[in-house]
Image (cartoon, rainbow, N blue to C red):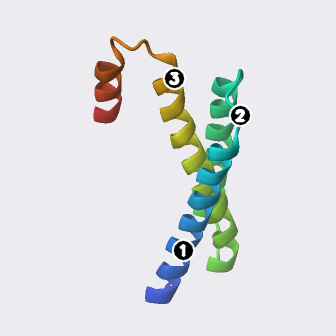
Amino acid sequence: MEIGAQGLGLLMAASGIGAVFGGLLVASAKQGRGVGKTILKTTIAYSISIIALAVSPTIWIALPFLVVAGLLGSYFMSSNNALIQLRIADDIRGRVVGAYMQT
């Protein structure tokens, strides 16, 4: 399927819109227990949305999956970074975050 520059722009915008909403969702979330389980569920849902995106036959079917993928990807990355920052002891946080950033 050839979508051209306009189609690519639509796909990039859809991903960006989802990422913005994902960031806002994380910012409004309460800190509490169960963050690890939420990250696991988000990872599974993200995988499903990427698979659905990959098999989408048209751009109009792909766009909603890309919005969802952007949202879930942003939510996962932000939650994972927050979890690492909050759960690691102060004296080793720099080394742990440095190793995490290299991966």
Label 3: state its secondary structure.
helix
Residue, disc 3:
86
Q: Can residue 51 be spotted in the picture?
A: no
Image quadrant in which you'd find residue 37: top right
In primary-sequence order, the first of circles 1 and 2 is 1
Label 1: state its secondary structure.
helix
Q: Residue at x 66, y 40 (%)?
A: 42
Residue type at numbered disc 2: Lys
69 shown above or below 38: below
12 shown above or below 19: below
- Mark 3 to mark 1 CA distance (whole Å): 32 Å
Task: Determine contact: label 3, label 2, CB under 8 Å.
Answer: no
Q: Position of residue 88 (x, y in %)?
A: 45, 16
In primary-sequence order, the first of circles 3 and 1 is 1
Residue, disc 2:
30
Q: Which residue is drawn at 67% across and 49% down?
A: 25
Residue 13 image label:
1
Q: In the image shown, does 21 or 27 lie closer to the viewer?
A: 27
Residue type at numbered disc 1: Ala
Q: In the image shown, does 19 or 89 lie closer to the viewer?
A: 89
